[in-house]
Image (cartoon, grey):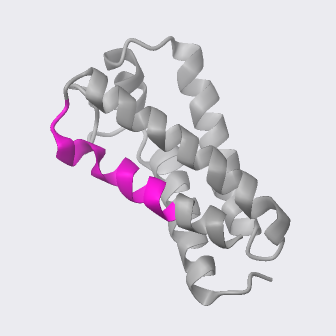
Amino acid sequence: MTSSPILAILQLVVGLGLLNVWMIRRGGPTSYRGGHAQTLRGEFTAYGLPIWMFYLVGGLKVVAGLALIVGIWMPTIVRPAALLVAVLMVGAIAMHLKVKDPVRRSLPALAVLAMCTWIAKQS
């Protein structure tokens, strides 16, 4: 089991957050969607990315989210999952910059990047 309650909480926050975004809320609008997109898939279109990238990134984020949760009991998988999510968050921030979104739309990605960086350092 993980050595720190704070680490476990952050793993749950990031893991459940990723699962929420990619499995529950992917089809609806939020105030953080990139460009003028109303859905998560629409964001990838707004960014000019091919549809296969939507499925690749989504699959990676779901797997990494699950790994962060399972990592509470299997700590060896936490660092790779956190680093993967951190890299994906850098990509998300870059896409928001690409379409000239207001900074507030990048705040969730920035927060997840910070949490994953901390998780990776502690793991």
Q: Tell me: 33 left or right of 111.
A: left
| Residue 28 coordinates in the image, percent (x, y) | 32, 40
User: What number of labels is visible?
Assistant: 0
Q: Is residue 106 visible?
A: yes
Q: Nearer the viewer, residue 79 or 47?
A: 79
Q: Is residue 31 visible?
A: no
Q: Residue furthest front?
A: 121
Q: Quadrant of the N terminus?
A: bottom right
| Residue 37 coordinates in the image, percent (x, y) | 27, 27
Task: Check the image and report above or below for 13 versus 86.
Answer: below
Residue 111, quarter of the rendered image = bottom left
Q: Tell me: 86 left or right of 74.
A: left
Q: Nearer the viewer, residue 122 or 21?
A: 122
Extent of the magenta region: 101-115
Q: Nearer the viewer, residue 17 or 79?
A: 79
Residue at position x 58%, y 32% from top? 57
Q: Nearer the viewer, residue 110 or 23?
A: 110
- Principal SS element in the magenta part? helix
Q: Quadrant of the C terminus?
A: bottom right
Residue at position x 52%, y 53% from top? 18
Task: Check the image and report above or below for 40 versus 15.
Answer: above
| Residue 9 coordinates in the image, percent (x, y) | 56, 79
Q: Tell me: 117 left or right of 74.
A: left
| Residue 14 coordinates in the image, percent (x, y) | 53, 62
Is 111 part of what is drawn in magenta?
yes
Residue at position x 64%, y 62% from top? 120
Residue 42, quarter of the rendered image = top left
Task: Check the image and report above or below for 83 versus 92.
Answer: below
